[in-house]
Amino acid sequence: FPAVLLIVLGAIWLATGEKSETSLEASAVIPPWTGIASIVLVVSNVLAYAGMEVNAVHANDLKNPGKGFPKSIAIATFLILLVFILPTIAMAVAVPKKELGLTNGINLAFEVFFDKWNMPWAVTAISALIALGAFASVVTWIAGPSRGLLAAARTGLLPPSLQKRNKAGVQVGILGVQGIVVSVLALLFIVIPNINTAFIALIDMAAALYLIMYMLMFAAAIRLRRSKPDVVRTYRTPAMKFVAGLGFVACATAFVLAFVPPEGFTGVPPAAYPFVVAAVVVVLGGPPLLFYAMRKPSWDQRTAAEHETAAEGVLVNPPPAQGAASPPPSQSTELH
């Protein structure tokens, strides 16, 4: 709602003849190329699409996944672009460039719009909505992945201390570690005096970690298409090598850019910036590999019931409906 409202207010601002703080010509709207450092912030846009792959688990719920799923992804991609581009232009229209920052642009724009129409109280209401949306996002990203991590942990991939749950079944062992890591990273806002600098650093670190996972995912897709070509799926990606290969190259490029300090970056010496990002990636990305190398049979804490519903027994596709003809032997549903 705040994004849509920002677009509407920006349109009304221009329609009523108010002065635009930035030129709307293509040369002013499209960022100029002044070297690699000028496009590094594009790495942060990777996080705008992060999590879209999770929706693939619902593909089989569609009536026609082959047509419906690509259409859903295309619509989501288009909406994300609109939500990121148009509100940004609305902010640039109302707020002078010298006042805009990476963390305050939205509130400044609403202040300008509502002050103009004598509605200063609305700024508080919109800020509350933005905070609520951010809080909901944080809760989702903390609870969801940690629950999945618990399922993997109980197969013996993490030590028993990290598999600890409370009486309600909440994964308190994993959430405790998450809280510590997030708190340490949040200290960057204190250690680095410039808030914009700390924000950029955190975004780059998060994007770098995400991109490692995406590169592994694209590589795995190519390998599975080659090693398991006969697995029947309700949705099959066409031209897998090209699609996944393009995704891998794009992620690899963004991963490299994550180590380049953005133009105008202050607070950390440019020469030290790549090492800071690399250190965080190693510190946060290394433990899973370490735990995997150190795993012991005693770490497997699954009950007999959990062993019966192990991940290896999950069907790639749901079984055919009763009365439906069984697929030919060459296209039988496999376990994956």
Image: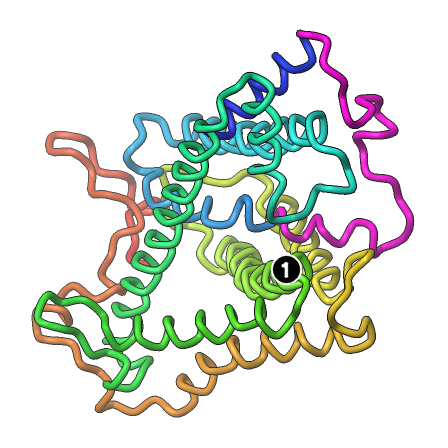
Q: Going by the image, does 105 lie left or right of 260?
A: left
Q: Quadrant of residue 127?
A: top left
Work out whether residue 55 can be spotted: yes
Residue appearing at x 26%, y 77% in the figure: 173
Range of residues picked out in magenta? 16-45
| Residue at x-position 70% and y-position 62% | 258
153 above or below 91?
below
Task: In the displayed orientation, state which residue is furthest to the right.
Answer: 34
Scheme by which the image is coloured = rainbow
Membership of 23 in magenta stretch: yes
Q: Position of residue 327 (x, y in %)?
A: 27, 39
Residue drawn where x is 83% and y is 24% of the image: 23
Q: Quadrant of residue 273?
A: bottom right
Residue 270 percent across, percent down from the top left: 81, 71
Which of the pair 48/191 is nearer the observer? 191
Residue 70 in view: no
- For the residue pair 15 and 42, the one nearer the viewer reads as 15
Q: In the image, residue 14 lies at what x, y percent? A: 69, 13
The C terminus - image quarter: bottom left
Q: Nearer the viewer, residue 194 or 48?
A: 194
Residue under pointer 1: 195
Relative placement, left or right, of 255 versus 60 is: right
| Above or below, comparing residue 137 to residue 336 in the picture | above
Q: Secondary structure at mark 1?
A: helix
Q: Is residue 44 magenta?
A: yes
Q: Amino acid at mark 1?
A: Ile
Q: Residue furthest top?
A: 16
Residue drawn at 59 percent across, 27 percent down: 82
Task: Examine the rendered structure and indicate whether residue 182 appears above or below residue 79.
Answer: below
